Image: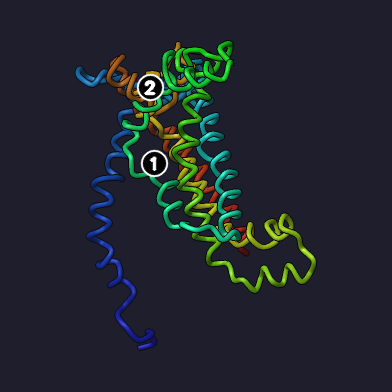
Amino acid sequence: MGRPPGEPGRVAYLYLLPAFVVYAVFLLYPIGRAVQISLYDWDGLTLGRWAGLDNYTAILSDERLRAGFGHALVLIVFYAVIPLAIGLTLAAILNHAKVRGLGFFRTVVFLPQVVAMVVVAVAWRRVYAPDGTLNALLGALGLDGLTRGWLGDHTFALPAVGVVGTWFESGLVTVLLLAGMSRVPMELYEAARLDGAGAVREFFAVTLPSVRGEIAVALTLTVIAALRTFDLVYVTTRGGPGDSTSVPSFEVYHRAFGLGQVGSAAAIGVTLTVVIFAISFAINRLADKGTT
């Protein structure tokens, strides 16, 4: 009596229970276990010693760890900001221009996403090699003074890794934005033209607000990819030269399996998880405010 038609609301939780159990076993429990391990000074073999928050304070005091998080923020520019600018430009042009073979173009630009990152890293390591494709091209153009061992240079190693991320993510962003722009009603563009809007004003007044949701998705995916990148750094530079390309995910591996500092590695992993969640939450909140 007094209930709306249908089953009681609590029955819905029974339908959600199987999925939640799987979620809890494979995600929530490992995260909780990682938090527990991060509170100990443990080498993974012997009995651990209670360390409290020492592993977390070390992240702030350890120059190498601070640099790793700083490098991850730099990679966000290459993985997210630059691909977003490229994707918006390409998608806007292709959405308005009558391009033959647009489906083939979408397949080509999306192709890096279906190639394993390890394969991508091996290929680009060869491109950046001292006798590789990039230096050969510079030499052919008479720019021998610019040739160098790109992945072995303290100044250029991190940007070189970032360029690979730009190449890898630009296709994904372009395809996402193309899909969003294709759903924008043509009446909006016609109304903008009647008001005397040019191509640039039309883009900022109609296209950009209409694909705010797709932009949020693209930024979320690419920012997460930048912060959790490991295989690219591992294959190309191993965090070197020195620690110029070290990132948090690589530090997790290096400290756990290289130095035997499992507690410290767990603390880095937990911190990285919190950072990823906070940035993703902020992006989606900003996108939601823009649509209201």
Q: Is residue 187 above or below residue 92?
A: below
Identity of the residue furthest to the left in this view:
45
> In terms of image quadrants, where is residue 291?
bottom right
Instruction: Tell me the amino acid under the disc marked 1.
Output: Pro
Give above or below for 102 relative to 53: below
Q: Residues within 10 Å of mark 1 (few under 14, many from 20)?
A: some
Label 1 element class = helix
Q: Considering the image in quadrants, where does the C terminus appear?
A: bottom right
Residue for point 43% across, 33% down: 272
Residue 112 got which mark? 1
Colour logic: rainbow
The first of marks 1 and 2 along the sequence is 1
Q: Does residue 226 appear in the picture of this structure?
A: yes
Residue, disc 2: 126
Q: Residue at x 53, y 55 (%)?
A: 177
Q: Residues within 10 Å of mark 2 (few under 14, many from 20)?
A: some
Q: Quadrant of the N terminus?
A: bottom left
Which sits in the foreground, 275 or 142? 142
| Numbered label tally | 2
Q: Amino acid at mark 2?
A: Arg
- Quarter holding residue 205: bottom right
Q: Report the residue that reaches farthest toward the right.
A: 196
Structural distance between the alpha carbons of marks 1 and 2: 17 Å
Q: Provide residue 266's location: percent of width, then percent of height.
A: 34, 28
Position in image of residue 207 (x %, y %) = 63, 60
Closer-to-camera residue (248/95): 95
In x, y percent, where is residue 62? 48, 16
The answer to whether residue 267 is seen in the rendering is: no
